[in-house]
Amino acid sequence: MTLKATINQITVNSLSLPEAAAAIAAAGFGGITVWRDKVEAISVRAAKDIISDHGLAVTGFCIAGLFTRDGRAGVQARIDDSRRSIDIAAELGARSIVTVVGGLLPETKSLDEAREVAFEALARTLEHARAAGVLMALEALHPMYAPDWSVVNTLAMANDWCDRLGPGMSMVVDCYHVWWDPAAPAEVARAGRAGRLSDFHIGDWLLETKSLLLDRGIPGEGVIDLRAWRDGMTAAGFTGWAEVELFSERIWAMPPAEALASIRVACDRLLSEAE
Amino acid sequence: MTLKATINQITVNSLSLPEAAAAIAAAGFGGITVWRDKVEAISVRAAKDIISDHGLAVTGFCIAGLFTRDGRAGVQARIDDSRRSIDIAAELGARSIVTVVGGLLPETKSLDEAREVAFEALARTLEHARAAGVLMALEALHPMYAPDWSVVNTLAMANDWCDRLGPGMSMVVDCYHVWWDPAAPAEVARAGRAGRLSDFHIGDWLLETKSLLLDRGIPGEGVIDLRAWRDGMTAAGFTGWAEVELFSERIWAMPPAEALASIRVACDRLLSEAE
């Protein structure tokens, strides 16, 4: 089983959606994962046509969630906003929407409270996603993002939440976030058995990471045993896209075509290598 | 149960050991945790006398481990070096030596291999520590340090390793490293039942952390619910020192007396507050 590669448009963050779609297609990728702000900058209809004209699949949509960011008083607005994102994802034909639940509540240091509030908000958003036919792909983020981005920090937590939430949930496995976790391989297998592996991100962790937010590596540049992750995902039954999503000031400073060419070579090496 | 506060001398990294002991005692703390390079800069005998003259307890010693750092070929030298550190810790009267096992092996991306090599090296060092009467205090480091500092990244792993290694092992609970982990409270209780809670570090996680290595916060400056951690530790039977160990360019740029005064106020607030 050889996985196909797709590009998250944040990787070429300086480009508009039409520019990104053209560059990604020119670099030989078959898909694009889009961000809502870039879609809305040109209209959903225009985005859909442009992506289609370039022969690209919409391999994902970013993002739903951040439920806790504005405190308890702001949860309903975040749910409403996520519902709108789900509608756009559905209109674009995305199978799943990346779901990042949010970090601590500004009013308390309690992780438990943040997790409870985020869980309940996700449950209420899920009904809408089910009706729209879009999977909510829950993404566990690295523990260093617990304060401000996500209090779901391991694949075990993501699996537990998906178990409790039921149909309509799926999972993002992002190696950058979970590679260090000794329980991760078993949790990938568990997610596979539950049929909930929808998204696979293959960014790398650089040995001398300079920024918590903006210093991810091209597959192969860093320390993660991505071949082992690839094999674990395919063994768990995953047949979707391997997505490169690089928040990186270094990559963003490169000419986009050059960055995409390097990523293309890295993906070919990683995804076509024998096990 | 009110815990007493101690200072890890890295917090006043610009000072020599004599200067640090004087400043820490003047700020009203009762203990100091020392680093080997600072001790050896003046001789072990002189360090012991100076610390004693200031009425301070030696509340810890840094460090043993880093077994994997130079690859498999370098493990024996790291073990030998750790044994020497243990001897110095014993001579100073330290009850425990902070043990940081090391990150990935330079020759492979396999976390499993790094963990196996580190575990075996620790087992071989432990014999020496038992004979010297110094506890090897295993410290789980934040997952962001898995590549280069420690492949033990959760309290569950640390507890598992201590179970397997047996007598002579203890644990450091450092809130900065493990605060995000939903399993942490149960693992603190587990370590307490096993009688292995020897060290408690109360550095804080800053909301906008600027550096992976050098941006820790004074207790109360950040997002960690340190009162809950304090209560969890005391409920688990911990009666030792609450240690402030700040790797922080910001703190290091302050006049040491001023930094210690701020930390003193923060510790008084945290440690004397009602539950």
Image: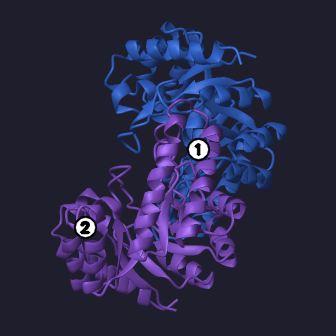
Chain colours: A purple, B blue
Which mark lies nearer to you, 1 or 2? 2
* Chain assignment, label 1: B
Question: Tag 2: residue type?
Answer: Val
Residue at 67% over, 29% down: B228
Q: Dot 2: within a 10 Å radius of its alpha carbon, few (fewer than 14), some, or many (20 or more) residues?
A: many
Q: Is residue A245 above or below residue A271?
A: above
Secondary structure of the residue carrying tag 2 is: helix
**In whole angstroms, how far apart are the C-alphas of marks 1 and 2?**
31 Å
Q: Position of residue B236 (x, y in %)?
A: 79, 32
Which of the pair B18/A19 is nearer the observer? Answer: A19
Amino acid type at mark 1: Trp
Residue beneath label 2, please? A12
Counting from the top left corner in percent of width and height, residue B231 is at 72, 26
Q: Which residue is mark 1?
A: B180
Residue at 68%, 42% in the rendered image:
B136
Discs 1, 2: same chain: no
The foreground one among B123 and B266 is B266
Label 1 residue SS: loop
Res. B169 visible in picture:
no
- B260 or B64: nearer the viewer: B260
Identify the residue at horizontal 66%, vertical 47% (top origin). Answer: B182
Q: Provide residue A93's location: percent of width, then percent of height.
A: 42, 77
